[in-house]
Amino acid sequence: MNPGERGERWRDWRWQLVNRISRVEHLPLHYEEREALIPVAARYPVSITPYYASLIRWDDPADPIARQCVPSQDEVAFRLPDSTPDPLAEQRYSPLPGLVHRYPDRVLLLASAVCPVLCRHCNRKRTWRRPEALLGSKEWRRALDYIRRERGVREVILSGGDPLMLPLSRLSRILEALRAIPHVEVVRIGTRVPVTLPMRVTPELCSVLEGARPLWINTHFNHPREVTREAEEACDSLVTRGIPVSNHTVLLKGVNDDQEVLLTLFRRLQAISVRPYYLFQCDSALGTDHFRVPLPEGISMMEGMWGRTGGLTLPRFVVDLPGGKGKVSAERAHCLSLSGEEALFMNFEGETVRYRW
Ligand SMILES: *Cc1c(COP(=O)(O)O)cnc(C)c1O
Ligand code: SF4
């Protein structure tokens, strides 16, 4: 089907959700391949919207879109020694279920247990069958009370699951409650909806989000082929309502572990007014080890881009340290040495330059 033939239903996000691929039996794979994936899916379920599935080139066994959403044997068969179900120790840093408070000035709320597409590299795949999200109104009340008490919290990040999967009336009430807390200066929503279900970004949703400004959307594009006309329209509707959109990419083997792919992605994002924010080293989450790229590769790819492309296309390359030790920048410093009155820098052409003040 080409987009013209897809018609109204295709653009209806509810239709997209109802018609999700949620059984390996429904994947267009050979019988033996599907059979082999049944036990994988029993452990880590499948969900792919028809829209996201339409981006896959099924005749390519190494398709980067398929790799992100079609289960793989490696999820259960390949394991590196340091991987754990909860690599960032989110449970340890949860004073209440569904609320992660790791940094002094910001808290993360697991606002929803649902994602339109279940990403095979998800670092919260432990929660897919056992949600840790804030599900009932009692839990939400307790989370909001906690934030009201913690005066140091200036930013609340709704994460998940995908917060934009919440019923609109509920999302609206949550955003209003957060806005009413004087010390909460800003809300951030982490969502993959612009990538996996862009038709969810309706005018009604945009109105709710606009009413909760200052609000930032941080989304999750990993490959230039995800930057479609539909995705662009979704981001554009947010930006034109005054909602800045930024992006984190996860560095994934077989998806985007290539400097040209990353450069194309970051440039396309800037061209649709989406600011590349972080490039994450893939966390040591159990079931995702086959995606891990050696750290030096990420560092040199980012170094290779510096100076070649504008600063607004370049995210920071970040490792979220195991055990909840926090995020760190994984870039080599351009500043080679520093003394009381001079510094030595390495510029983007590899030249050493002295700077005095
Ligand atoms: C990543 C993360 C944040 C947000 O950190 P930023 O550097 O502001 O993007 C907040 N809380 C937790 C627990 C996180 O893992
Ligand atoms: S959208 Fe985010 S939370 Fe949902 S499955 Fe993908 S990576 Fe995990």
Image: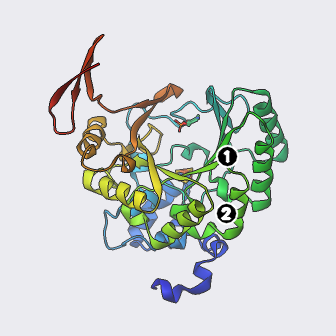
Dividing the picture into quadrants, the one containing residue 342 is: top left
Write the residue at 39% across / 68% down. Answer: 32
The label on residue 206 is 2
Q: Is residue 319 left or right of residue 244?
A: left
Question: Residue 126, image x and y in percent?
Answer: 57, 43
Write the residue at 23% across / 26% down. Answer: 345
Q: Is residue 302 above or below residue 339?
A: below
All told, the count of numbered labels is 2
| Quadrant location, the C terminus | top left
Ligand 1 appears in which quadrant?
top right
Q: Judge depth for marks 1 and 2 and give the one in front.
A: 2
Q: Is residue 132 left or right of residue 250?
A: right
Question: Residue 100, image x and y in percent?
Answer: 65, 33
Q: Label 1 belongs to which residue? A: 131
Dot 1 crowding, Cα within 10 Å, few <14, some 14–19, many 20+? some
* Label 2: element kind: helix
Question: Residue 105, image x and y in percent?
Answer: 63, 29
| Of 201 and 237, the residue lying toward us | 237
Q: Is residue 99 above or below residue 340?
A: below
Label 1 within 8 A of ligand 2 by Cβ: no
Q: Is residue 194 above or below residue 9?
A: above
For the residue marked with disc 2, what is the amino acid? Cys
Q: Is residue 169 left or right of residue 218?
A: right
Q: Residue furthest front?
A: 357
